[in-house]
Amino acid sequence: MPGSNQAIQGRGGRFDPMVSSIVLEGCGNFRVKIALSLISCKKLVLKRIRHKNDSPGVDDAEVCLLKLADKISNGTVIKINDTGTIVSVSPGTLIGGSFSFECSNSRGIGYYLEFLLMVAPFCKTPIESTLVGVSNVPHDPSVDMITQSWLPTYRISVGLSAGASTKIDIQKRGVYPGGGGEVLFSSRPCSGVVPVDKIDVGKVCRVRGIAWSCRVSSSYGQSLVSGAKSVLNQFLSDVYFTIDHRKGQYAGKSPGFGLTLWAERKDGGVYSAEAMSEPEGSDNVLMDAETIGKLAANRLLDQIYRGGFIDSGTQSLAFVLMACESGRNASRLAVGNLSEYSVCTLRLIQKFLGVTFNFQYQSQDNPIKLSEENVEENENETDIDSNSKMLIATCFGAGVQNINKSIR
């Protein structure tokens, strides 16, 4: 009715009827923008994409991501202007399906897996995909990190049935820049994302890791393990590593080695970190395997020190799933210091879904909101340990439901 202020439905959620399209500038958080556009059914227009660069417009990886979005959806209209500086996406229906996809070697397969994890719960049918490209690259999360650290958080949000069916399997490793890796990704849609309530303080009980190497001597794996253990065994005895040495057709096209670590808490929380050798042909200073192992261990200790239920790399995916909760219930999640990428994701969530997050510091000794008396007592204290408090992210879901899911 004219003049009415009713909300409209997008994937089952209620959003602002006055906003039919979102206009943004720049290429930052590109995969999050595309994912939120498909989830919210709002048209997305991206302008001024690298318009002042020597190579203006979208790059190869972003074009591949748009192709992937078109492959898992039906009726999506994607337009790119002649210079590539303006991209418009009119979302259709997320259908999922079985397919093989060739990823750009300029970004890791983890770049595309993050996008798939955001939209997979809202597809019509399960996704059975084979992604071919670079499995390990310095500037993107590796497939190992996503499998060990991101999937536990994802399974909590999508429920038991859909979570148990979500699997990532590395068939072949491919190191940047040559690539040649092959990863199998499978997932099932869910009726709706469930609320999350993870604010308890847990202790790290064990550390696990994968020392991988491709087209180099197998001794590099032992050196990676030795370097990491020299740091981690000072704090914990339950440290165990798996050595994954690949050769031949299973090792990709470029040499390299690295270490992925994850620390598990008793309550299910996971922290992760990784480090790898410099890519072939790089001008940077080369590091030996033992030094890389120590670097990965120190990065893991830094993530543990930040606290929270998840590490900084998982924050963006967790925030998107919390905002898409189907029952308009409150979700709470303990996080560490927010990364710049996560802050940009929060702004995009507010634009597309209308969900605003509330953040409060709470005592790790007693995860209850600090009283006014405690606040007054701490006003005059100038030296307060920032790690004695943890950051709690709270939001109410947008009510996004998967109305496309097939009924069997």
Image (tube, grey):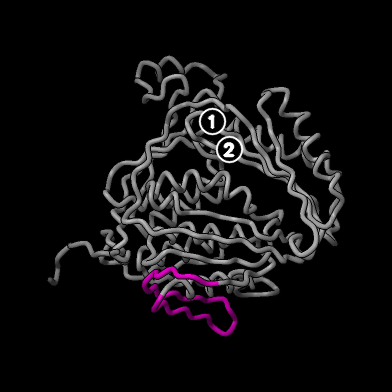
| Cα distance between the residues tagged 2 and 1 | 8 Å
Residue named by callout 1: 265
Mark 2 or mark 1, which is nearer to you?
1
The numbered mark, 2 or 1, whose residue comes first in the sequence reads 1
Residue at the spot 66% in from the left edge and 27% down from the top edge: 238
Q: Secondary structure at mark 1?
A: strand
In the figure, 177 relative to 391: above or below?
below
Front in this rendered view, residue 224 or 128: 128
Residue at the spot 68% in from the left edge and 30% down from the top edge: 239
In reply to whether residue 358 is colored magenta, the answer given is no
Q: Residues within 10 Å of mark 2 (few under 14, many from 20)?
A: many
Front in this rendered view, residue 57 or 243: 243
Q: Residue 11, how many percent across, how many down?
A: 31, 63
Bounds of the magenta segment = 74-99
Q: Residue 4, how many percent across, how many down?
A: 14, 65
Q: Residues within 10 Å of mark 1 (few under 14, many from 20)?
A: some
Residue named by callout 2: 271
Q: Residue 85, how many percent across, how many down?
A: 56, 76
